[in-house]
Image: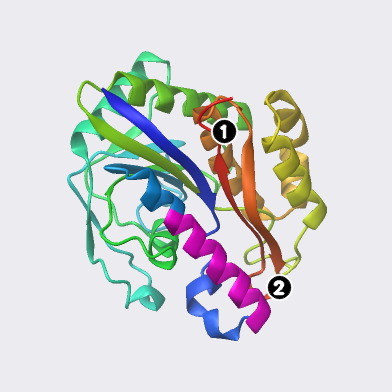
Amino acid sequence: MAELTGIFATPHAPPLVRDWNSIAPARRAGLGAAFAELGRRITAARPDVLVMIGADHWANFFLSNMPGIALGCGELHDGPPERWLADYPHRAMAGHAAFGQHLATVAYGASFEPSLCYQLALDHSFCVPLWKSGLDPLPAIVPVIINAMEAPLPSMRRCYEFGTVLKQAIDSFPAPLRVAVLASGGLSHSVGEPAMGDIDEDFDRACLARFGLHDPQPLFDFLSDARVARAGNGASETRFWAVAHGVAAARGFEHFYYGAIPEVYTGCAFAEWRLTP
């Protein structure tokens, strides 16, 4: 049977690669140490499969076809299409088709109908954390893409519930497999809006405090559509953290770095959920 070995969260903002040398030295050092710690923790979890919860920034989907949830069920994923990630060291990344298909089967049995994708290009949502955390070799990647781009979006509660389904899929997979989960995105930020560059530190810290509670209801109450929108259009990526929170059954977590980084336009947080109460 499969085993859940770790649940983590990370930012993925493009400036973390594209403008890395323009970040103030002290902030760059803090972010570098946080990515190194993330890599150390994931490596210590020894995953055979890393299920990554992230966004698709028009690499695979557009307004003509925007699934609420899409699962990467292929044996292989293409590397990032963004030109500024041309030096990313993995032009292709192994998937785990058997686990992806199993997750799809469990999801359909639990009244979720995700789209199934057998060939995906993984954009910066996936590749920035993999690269910056120094994972080498990479585990097999099973991407879970949550629509955080265009309304209507899955509710926070629905994302949390999908996390519980992901945990069921891990528990019921009929072969030995070490599985870790990495939510990639958030927290407050705006992209292409007049508020781009504004960071809502109060929102970020309130989110982190509620992820630390054993009851998810205060998180659902706080993360209303209106409150998330005030924190920037990119704050919708807190949905990915809600999925991870569901995998952990709201057992509580540790955020081991937070910084409101103006050069990255983002409230950057790194976290690990507890596997036991």
* One can see residue 121 in this view: yes
**Region rendered in magenta:** 25-40
Mark 1 vs 2, N-terminal side: 1
- What amino acid is found at the position of numbered circle 2 in the picture? Pro
At x 34%, y 56%, the residue is 122
Q: Give coordinates of residue 214: x percent, y percent.
A: 68, 25
Mark 2 surroundings: few (<14), some (14-19) or many (≥20) residues within 10 A: some
Label 1 SS: helix
Q: Does the residue at mark 1 contact the one at mark 2 (Cβ under 8 Å)?
A: no
- Is residue 233 covered in magenta? no
Spatial separation of the CA atoms under disc 1 and disc 2: 27 Å
- What amino acid is found at the position of numbered circle 1 in the picture? His
At x 53%, y 24%, the residue is 161
Residue closer to the observer: 167 or 75: 167
Q: Give coordinates of residue 139: x percent, y percent.
A: 27, 50
Q: Quadrant of residue 31?
A: bottom right
Q: Quadrant of residue 128?
A: bottom left
Query: What residue is disc 2 on?
Result: 262
Query: What residue is disc 1 on?
Result: 245
Q: Quadrant of residue 277?
A: top right
Mark 1 surroundings: few (<14), some (14-19) or many (≥20) residues within 10 A: many
In this image, 223 relative to 101: left or right? right
Q: How is the image coloured?
A: rainbow
At x 37%, y 52%, the residue is 43
Q: Residue furthest front?
A: 44
Q: Quadrant of the N terminus?
A: top left
Would you place residue 179 above or below residue 249 in this image?
A: below
